[in-house]
Image (tube, rainbow, N blue to C red):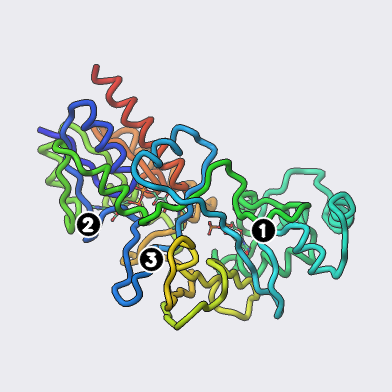
């Protein structure tokens, strides 16, 4: 009998490492041919550029323990994500800051003036915003909403912002100063050689056996005392109640000599541009230098059964299905559902690591 961990992403690798340190052996399986899940990074064989295969990943957190945990796995380089957005033929800072406001409205406002200027345009917040659109109209007003959020959000989610929850926009700040950092967290960075070596370090322990190219099969359960499941929640139950909805991304790769766009991320909110953004991966490692460049245009669409699930949709129809799957999960003895897919939530890496540490510690405390 043993412990099986399904998924070799951060969720699975952190749990395996915590159990190993406590003297418990485990087997980690992953259906992919590599470790690190969606955080997987690899060197481009032609250019040597570090590529984030499933979309760029920037580590940002206020959790000092998780930050120390990550730094103990390998060198983390400072990185600030300074995103730009091309809108109607001009380039702006994103998220919206004082520069964006002054440039967009042709003003030279100071912080308090800009706050009052935007407040005059915003819809009153008598009641808390429910939809993305309500939130945008209360937060930035109609002009900035139409220019920066409406088209991008329709492309990203395939739905009207009226049908989406306000929580999606609440991920972004609105700043009345010239701070152009995409994130507001205390600790931010990217591993010097990418995420995969850090996950390899977590899995490198005599009590951990890792099998790649190994999808889970239900007959594997018979030999286990316990399973930690970081695959899709509905997938564990054979999709018997239906499929939880996800958005997936198609990445259109192109390479050139030199510098394509001068920054790591260029968003394209205009509705007539079919992609949401272009990411240029060498700019995620500014401590390196490369003559060539590799970029990806990102196109979002509904995930089919064979696609990589990226963003859980979590609208009311999904919420009902999710509760039914959560009830099944609760009743499933000997299985703990973890991570982004196992709990059907949008989880950043820091929260993933925090929850994996807490899950492993709770499991170990219960066995004592
Ligand atoms: P995953 O990394 O998805 O790992 C799950 C693993 O389980 C996968 O390797 C999969 O192959 C395996 N698996 C699934 N089913 C089975 C099965 N049946 N049998 C065997 N193996 C199976 N977070 C940040 O903090 N910063 C960012 O900048 C950031 N950018 C992101 C950009 C995109 C486009 C996306 C989608 C996410 C981003 N995230 C970011 C979130 C980050 O990717 C997650 O926090 C992290 O990947 C979660 O780790 P996990 O181990 O829970 O899941
Ligand atoms: N968004 C937008 N325009 C932008 C950037 C973001 O409309 O230029 C919206 C979009 O709906 C996105 C949400 O804001 O899903 C949250 O942005 P974030 O960068 O957190 O998205 P994610 O990390 O999920 O891609």
- How many labels were placed on the picture? 3
Occupied quadrant, residue 53? bottom left
Q: Distance between the residues labelled 1 and 3?
A: 24 Å
The residue at label 1 has a CB less than 8 Å from ligand 2: yes
Q: Is residue 359 left or right of residue 246?
A: left
Residue positioned 66% across, 56% down in the render: 132
- The label number, if any, that marks residue 51 in the structure image: 3
Pointer 1 or 2: first along the chain? 2
The residue pinned by badge 1 equals 95
Tell which quarter ligand 2 is in: bottom right
Query: Do residues under tags 3 and 2 come within 8 Å of each other at their CB atoms?
Result: no
Looking at the figure, which quarter contains the N terminus? Answer: top left
Residue positioned 62% across, 59% down in the render: 163
Please tell me whether residue 273 is drawn above or below residue 36 in the rendered image: below
Question: Residue 239, can we see it?
Answer: no
x and y percentages locating residue 272 in the rendered image? 62, 80
Residue positioned 38% across, 66% down in the render: 51
- Please identify, in this view, whether the residue under mark 3 or under mark 2 is nearer the observer: 3
x and y percentages locating residue 312 in the rendered image? 46, 54
């Amino acid at each position: 009998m043993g412990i099986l961990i399904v998924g070799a992403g951060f969720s699975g690798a952190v749990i395996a490492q915590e159990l190993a340190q406590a003297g418990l052996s485990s087997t980690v399986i992953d259906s992919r041919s590599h470790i690190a899940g969606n955080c997987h990074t690899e060197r481009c064989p032609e250019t040597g550029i570090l590529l984030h295969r499933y979309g760029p990943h920037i580590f940002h957190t206020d959790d000092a323990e998780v930050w120390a945990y990550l730094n103990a796995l390998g060198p983390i380089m400072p990185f600030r994500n300074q995103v730009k957005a091309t809108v109607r033929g001009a380039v702006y800072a994103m998220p919206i800051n004082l520069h964006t406001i002054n440039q967009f409205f042709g003003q030279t406002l100071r912080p308090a003036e800009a706050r009052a200027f935007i407040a005059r345009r915003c819809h009153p917040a008598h009641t808390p915003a429910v939809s993305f659109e309500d939130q945008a109209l209360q937060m930035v007003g109609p002009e900035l909403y139409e220019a920066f959020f409406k088209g991008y959000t329709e492309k990203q989610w395939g739905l009207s912002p009226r049908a989406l929850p306000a929580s999606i926009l609440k991920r972004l700040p609105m700043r009345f100063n010239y701070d152009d950092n995409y994130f507001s967290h205390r600790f931010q960075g990217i591993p010097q050689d990418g995420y995969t070596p850090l996950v390899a370090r977590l899995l490198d322990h005599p009590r951990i056996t890792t099998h790649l190219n190994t999808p889970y099969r239900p007959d594997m359960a018979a030999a286990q005392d316990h399973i930690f499941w970081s695959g899709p929640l509905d997938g564990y139950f054979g999709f018997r109640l239906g499929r939880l909805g996800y958005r997936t991304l198609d990445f259109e790769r192109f390479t050139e000599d030199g510098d394509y766009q001068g920054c790591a991320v260029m968003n394209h909110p205009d509705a007539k541009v079919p992609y949401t953004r272009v990411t240029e991966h060498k700019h995620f490692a500014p401590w390196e230098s490369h003559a060539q460049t590799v970029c990806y245009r990102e196109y979002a669409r509904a995930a089919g059964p064979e696609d990589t699930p990226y963003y859980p949709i979590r609208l009311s129809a999904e919420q009902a299905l999710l509760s039914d799957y959560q009830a099944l999960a609760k009743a499933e003895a000997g299985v703990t559902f973890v991570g982004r897919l196992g709990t059907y939530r949008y989880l950043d890496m820091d929260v993933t690591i925090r929850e994996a540490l807490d899950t492993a510690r709770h499991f170990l405390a219960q066995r004592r």
